[in-house]
Image (tube, grey):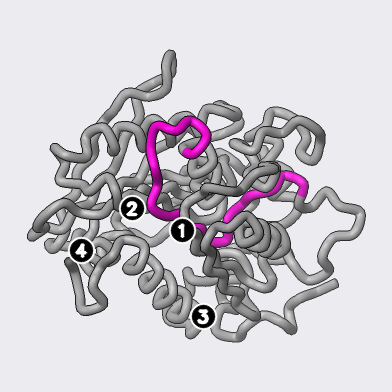
Amino acid sequence: MSSRHLVDAQIAPLIEIFAQMAFTPEGLSALRDAPMTAPSPPDDRVKRECVTVPGPAGAPDIDLHILTPVHAQGPLPLIYHIHGGGYIVGKASEMVLRHQSLVAELGCALASVEYRLAPETPFPGAIEDCYSGLAWMFDHAAERGIDPARIGVMGESAGGGLAAALALLARDRGDYRLAFQHLIYPMLDDRTGTSSDPHPYVGEYVWTAESNRFGWSALLGHEPGGDDVSPYAAPARATDLSRLPPAFIYTGALDLFLEEDLDYARRLARAGVPVEFHLFPGAFHGFELQEDSHLAGAARRLSMAALRRFMALSDDGPA
């Protein structure tokens, strides 16, 4: 059943742009070669660096792309960012410059991790890369001018799924305590799209059930929806969501991840985790890339306000 009549008119131009993207095994190489976002010019308010740190035991080192305000004062809060791309595409190096204005406006630091992609590196490669980078930031917080009490995770789509999984893994290993989890239409449940009763109006644009099946199959190394899938791969599989950091989640009413995100927010709340959830009508996956739309503006305002609260920053500008 078509959802075209439900799409917000201001983001409709994205439909044609994303229609040319093929999330298939045959199209994977071309997708990886194509830039996922428009290039952003350097911002002289922000210092940029790439640090290579040890990866998981027996695995390659990983890169952390770190942004800090040029005129930073005092220990800074840190956003540990994980990029999206269905677990199969995307580069932190391409995304990091898009975060310059966020760092400058909030007066925080941001580190984006270059994790290994599937299918070349199936689970648990990506989540262990993310954990190694997070551990390095915590262990070197003092020398980097970071406040370890104000480190949280943020991610979009598959990056949001990895951020949620990282919050679970950090809780269960007990080595580091996260201040927040900031999840943008997170990819949480491998069972989405495998149901005999799918939602009739979601997943028509950008990220479809077919794309989802490919992404999850690549990550898991087998077809999604079966038994014994780890919650560190698919956080929706976790049976215990208690003692997790406060969460901010938003998604679109036409996004394939609508129901899994709604359910995760509900379960977090039932587990006693503070959660803020926003649902945008007429919005499909990646809607905020239409930056001049009212939906993108609203999403950014809500997102920035939540980050300020999570990191105890002033509403008047950088700390």
Q: In the depicted view, which residue is nearer to us: 90 or 33?
A: 90
Disc sitting over residue 241 in the figure? none
**Residue 185, quarter of picture:** bottom right
Give the mark nearer the N terminus: 4 vs 1. Answer: 4
Q: Helix or strand or loop: what does disc 4 sit on?
A: loop
Position of the N terminus, as image quadrant, is: bottom right
* Residue identified by numbered label 2: 79
Separation of disc 4 and disc 3 at Cα?
25 Å
Q: Bin the neighbour count of mark 4 within 10 Å (Cα to Cα): few under 14, some 14-19, many 20 and up.
A: many
Separation of disc 3 and disc 2 at Cα?
23 Å
Q: Is residue 188 magenta?
A: yes
Q: Residue at x 60, y 86 (%)?
A: 9
Q: In the depicted view, which residue is nearer to us: 295 or 227?
A: 227
Residue interval drawn in magenta: 171-191
Query: Is residue 184 found left or right of 194 in the rendered image?
Result: left
* Residue identified by numbered label 1: 182
Give the mark nearer the N terminus: 1 vs 3. Answer: 1
- Amino acid type at circle 2 is Ile
Give the mark nearer the N terminus: 4 vs 2. Answer: 2
Q: Is residue 104 magenta?
A: no
Separation of disc 4 and disc 2 at Cα?
11 Å
* Residue identified by numbered label 3: 295
| Figure check: 189 above or below 133 | below
Disc sitting over residue 107 in the figure? 4
- Amino acid type at circle 1 is His
Q: Are marks 2 and 1 in contact (CB under 8 Å)?
A: yes
Q: Residue furthest right?
A: 196
Separation of disc 2 and disc 1 at Cα?
9 Å
Position of the C terminus, as image quadrant, is: bottom left
Q: Are marks 4 and 2 in contact (CB under 8 Å)?
A: no
Q: Residue at x 65, y 42 (%)?
A: 234
Q: Residue furthest top?
A: 58
